[in-house]
């Protein structure tokens, strides 16, 4: 599942998600829009935070798994 879709589905803002990770809003916006790929340590945190709905594979080549 795309990070942006997870954020939207859980009725939170990008700013709230950024605070959860200790990054600035702009960084989270880049990740959510697929313009930047999080470093491996943040990918692991995103996967745990999203309870496995957002995985590192969801960031590869801009291809997103929207089967959920």
Image: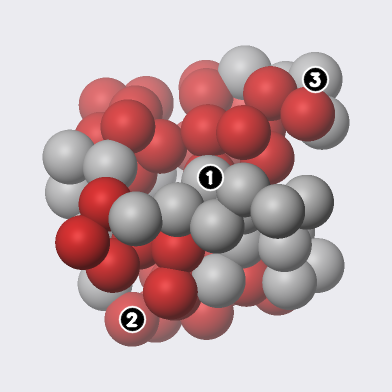
**Above or below for 1 versus 7:** below
Q: In this view of the protein, which residue sits in the foreground, 53 or 61?
A: 61
Q: Is residue 19 visible?
A: no
Residue 8 as seen in the image, left or right of residue 23: right
Mark 2 or mark 3, earlier in chain: 3
- Residue, disc 3: 11
- Give the CA separation, mark 2 to mark 1: 15 Å
Q: Residues within 10 Å of mark 3 (few under 14, many from 20)?
A: few
Q: Residue at the spot x=55%, y=57% of the render?
A: 65
Mark 1 or mark 3, earlier in chain: 1
Mark 2 or mark 1, earlier in chain: 1
At numbered mark 3, what does the secondary structure look like: helix, strand or loop? loop
Q: In this view of the protein, which residue sits in the foreground, 4 or 24?
A: 4
Q: Is residue 1 visible?
A: yes
Q: Which residue lies furthest to the front in this view?
A: 67
Q: Residue at the spot x=18%, y=49% of the render?
A: 36
Residue 20 at x, y percent in the picture: 62, 45
Q: Residue at the spot x=45%, y=63% of the render?
A: 58
- Residue, disc 2: 40
**Above or below for 63 versus 5:** below
- Residue, disc 1: 3
């Amino acid at each position: 599942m795309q990070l942006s879709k997870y954020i939207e589905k859980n009725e939170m803002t990008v700013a709230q998600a950024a605070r959860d990770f200790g990054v600035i809003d702009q960084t989270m916006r880049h990740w959510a829009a697929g313009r930047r790929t999080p470093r491996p340590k943040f990918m692991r945190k995103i996967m745990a935070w999203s309870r496995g709905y957002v995985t590192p594979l969801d960031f590869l080549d801009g291809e997103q798994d929207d089967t959920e």
